[in-house]
């Protein structure tokens, strides 16, 4: 494994070995200190990268980027160049490495770019290492890049993420200097995302249009057995799945993705993979690679990986836990409380910045947690509620209360855990238990943001976390830089902040109904759906904050909001059309066939024996035909709702119409269809069922 890990990555070790000393140093200065990159350095790096890639079998390179589709995109070019006398040589210049130009008109831009102004640029992000992608097509050198328009607006997820990293770096360094740290030169936010997914058999998948077109089942009755026995969570892994996971690990390790834990999740057919945390930029790139590789490798095992947030009704859906912290280049985790957090004022300041930032900007985090699919999860007792709150645990809550009272004197200490068996080791319990129901939980030395949708990039969640914390830190630094008595001012600041923002702290059961009432009493926003979340994006105070920290320009926010509305409308439209087609062409014909069989059965039994009791058949026929009529009626209603929503004139209005009317009509149509599934004989049902999908793997 030692030699395999990172074997496909142009990483630090490879650069150290292959680059001239001066070039290596210059590149490191760019990576670590953010200095701009010299053209000559780029040329030398490009050449070394090309030689290394060709030695590993590469023929092509691509600028690998993350447009606002949430997927990754690549445009392949070969290294091939022709000399004047017609010979082929392999070439790759610093310019080709650093900058690409392509037609950006087919990527979503939310009006930032009309089609005749189609120029888009990709720019090398040297802070995320280049890697080799290997598949049946061959080996390709992938260069992580940012993607922007001719007028330098960001058209991707990486650019604002990098900008938000710069923002938190700048503000956190100001705070560190105030606490006397003169040596740290960079502060980086770190993320370790846990990715959940489902695996289903490919042959069943291919017989379900809903899975193929929308990634989730639009019809379907839960199997008799769901997750109630809690036997799948951490259960032993089936051999077929284990073989998939093993191959996935190997392929990810080659790419330098430190896939570490893997286990079965709560629902049948559900699994999780988590890498070791790294900078949010690389973590985001790696999470995209994880999603891509999960899907690619599943197919090699005749499986299909579902990344959708709610593929199945009745069992848990999937999410992503975005573990987040901030670290200095000297290796200090600024969210590490240490043994006596009450004495660790610097930690308390960073902690307070997170608390205050989350409280003031909860709707932005809620936005980062939204996707059409997540609307079916959040707030339904399997995932955090749609209300943002922070879990701190016993020790820190106690300290927060002391700060509020203005007497910061002690930290609750860990106690011994006694299991009552002398041969078992005794150890200290953590200062706090876990709380699975909290959307934003402090877990020892990091925050775990648990609302991120399983299918979307983690970029937005980290952009929001970085920016809102940078904003609070900047306000604190402004206040404290001129302070006459630093300690006194800090104490006062923390006390004020805690007083103002303690309402966001909640350690109880986030799934309970009482919390919804209590949260409302506290004035915490309860933003129920994706379209509501999107509506908040362009609030003037948010635009001001993003512009202040140079994370987004106003035009970028407006365009992103537009793209999100459009995306929502498109996703639900495809779902509605898929449902309509499945109901019309599969369910209704199958049920008609079944009713005919029942009718014929009744007639032939009667014919054979006049006195025979056919009440069972007749009752069934009656129920089935009644439900069938209901299906037809609901189908018409859905078609009408879909057409009306489509006719709205802006993406925003369309999105609201789809949310208000179409999703409702969809769930109305689903009801009689699902009812029919429970009574129509299995062999007449036109598609694989939840039993096939969740258990026949
Ligand atoms: P859980 O107990 O929530 O299932 P896991 O152990 O599966 O957690 O995953 C925890 C994730 O948090 C891993 O990706 C891990 O690398 C990451 N992590 C650990 N420490 C930090 C940190 N300081 N900052 C960010 N992420 C971290
Ligand atoms: Mg977790």
Image: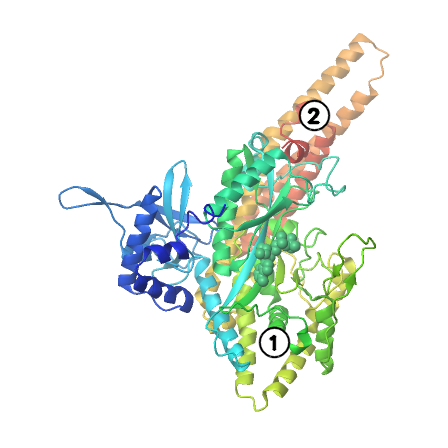
**Residue 287 in picture, x, y percent from top left:** 51, 51
Residue holding disc 2: 682
44 or 301, nearer to the observer: 44
Look at the image and tell me whether residue 210 can be seen: no
At 34% across and 67% down in the image, what residue appears?
36
At 58% across and 29% down in the image, what residue appears?
585
Look at the image and tell me whether residue 23 can be seen: yes
Q: Left or right of 305: which side holds 556?
A: left
Q: Left or right of 153: which side holds 693?
A: right
Q: Is mark 1 within 8 Å of ligand 1?
A: no
Q: Hey, which quadrant is residue 641 in on the image?
A: top right
**Residue 86 in picture, x, y percent from top left:** 15, 41
430 or 58, nearer to the observer: 430
195 or 149, nearer to the observer: 195
Q: Is 559 above or below relative to 58?
A: below
In the picture, the disc for residue 357 is none
Name the residue furthest top: 608
Name the residue furthest front: 423
How would you rate the neighbour count of disc 1 (Cα within 10 Å): few for under 14, some for 14-19, many for 20 or more? many
Residue holding disc 1: 349
Q: Earlier in the sequence, mark 1 or mark 2?
A: 1
Ligand 1's image quarter is bottom right
Mark 1 or 2, closer to the camera: 1
**Residue 233 in picture, x, y percent from top left:** 69, 44
Q: Is 348 above or below relative to 62?
A: below
């Amino acid at each position: 494994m030692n030699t395999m890990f990172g074997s496909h990555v142009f990483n630090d070790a490879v650069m150290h070995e292959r680059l001239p000393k001066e070039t290596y140093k210059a590149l490191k200065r760019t990576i670590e200190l953010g200095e701009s990159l010299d053209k000559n350095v780029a040329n030398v790096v490009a050449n070394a990268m090309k030689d290394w890639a060709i030695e590993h079998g590469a023929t092509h390179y691509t600028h690998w980027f993350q447009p606002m589709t949430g997927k990754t995109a690549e445009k392949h070019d070969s290294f091939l160049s022709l000399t004047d006398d017609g010979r082929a040589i392999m070439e790759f210049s610093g310019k080709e490495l650093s900058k690409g130009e392509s037609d950006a008109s087919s990527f979503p831009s939310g009006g930032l770019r009309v089609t005749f102004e189609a120029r888009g640029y990709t720019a090398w992000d040297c802070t995320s290492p280049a890697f080799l992608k290997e598949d049946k097509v061959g080996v390709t050198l992938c260069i992580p890049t940012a993607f922007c328009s001719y007028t330098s607006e960001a058209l991707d997820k990486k650019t604002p993420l990098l900008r938000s990293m710069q923002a938190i770096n700048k503000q956190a360094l100001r705070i560190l200097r105030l606490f006397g740290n003169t040596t740290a030169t960079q502060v980086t936010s770190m993320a370790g995302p846990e990715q959940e997914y489902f695996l289903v058999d490919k042959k069943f998948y291919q017989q379900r249009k809903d899975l193929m077109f929308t990634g989730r089942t639009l019809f379907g009755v839960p199997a008799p057995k769901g997750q109630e026995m809690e036997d799948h969570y951490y259960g032993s892994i089936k051999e077929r799945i284990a073989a998939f996971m093993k191959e996935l690990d190997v392929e990810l390790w080659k790419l330098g993705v430190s896939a570490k834990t893997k286990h079965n999740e709560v629902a049948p057919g559900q699994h999780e993979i988590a890498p070791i945390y790294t900078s949010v930029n690389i973590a985001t790139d790696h999470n995209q690679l994880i999603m891509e590789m999960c899907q690619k490798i599943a197919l090699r095992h005749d499986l299909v990986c579902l990344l959708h947030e709610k593929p199945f009704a009745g069992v848990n859906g999937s999410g992503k836990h975005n573990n987040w912290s901030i670290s200095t280049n000297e290796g200090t985790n600024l969210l590490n409380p240490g043994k006596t957090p009450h004495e660790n004022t610097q930690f308390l300041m960073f902690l307070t910045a997170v608390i205050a930032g989350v409280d003031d900007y909860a709707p932005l985090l809620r936005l980062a947690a939204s996707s059409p699919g997540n609307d079916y999860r959040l707030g339904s007792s399997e995932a955090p509620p749609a209300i943002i709150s922070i879990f701190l645990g016993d020790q820190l809550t106690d300290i927060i209360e002391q700060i509020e009272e203005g007497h910061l004197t002690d930290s609750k200490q860990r106690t011994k855990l006694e299991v009552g068996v002398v041969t078992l080791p005794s150890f200290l319990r953590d200062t706090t238990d876990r709380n699975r129901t909290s959307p934003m939980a402090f877990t020892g030395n990091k925050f775990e943001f648990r609302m991120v949708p399983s299918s979307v990039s983690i970029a937005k969640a980290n952009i929001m976390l970085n920016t809102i914390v940078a904003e609070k830190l900047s306000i604190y630094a402004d206040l404290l830089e001129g302070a006459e008595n630093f300690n006194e001012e800090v104490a006062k600041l923390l006390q004020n902040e805690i007083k103002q923002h303690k309402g966001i702290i909640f350690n109880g059961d986030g799934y309970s109904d009482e919390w919804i009432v209590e949260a409302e009493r506290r004035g915490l926003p309860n933003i129920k759906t994706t379209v509501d979340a999107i509506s908040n994006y362009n609030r003037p105070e948010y635009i001001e904050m993003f512009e202040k920290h140079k994370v987004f320009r106003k035009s970028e926010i407006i365009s992103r909001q537009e793209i999100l509305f459009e995306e929502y409308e498109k996703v639900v439209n495809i779902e509605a059309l898929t449902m309509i087609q499945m109901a019309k062409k599969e369910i209704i014909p199958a049920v008609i066939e079944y009713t005919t069989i029942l009718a014929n059965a009744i007639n032939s039994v009667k014919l054979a024996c006049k006195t025979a009791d056919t009440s069972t058949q007749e009752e069934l026929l009656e129920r089935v035909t009644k439900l069938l009529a209901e299906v037809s009626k609901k189908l018409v209603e859905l078609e009408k709702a879909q057409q009306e929503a489509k006719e709205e004139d802006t993406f925003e209005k369309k999105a609201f119409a789809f949310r208000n009317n179409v999703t409702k009509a969809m769930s109305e149509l689903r009801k009689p269809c699902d009812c029919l599934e429970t009574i129509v004989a299995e062999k007449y049902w036109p598609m694989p069922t939840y039993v096939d999908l969740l258990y026949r793997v």
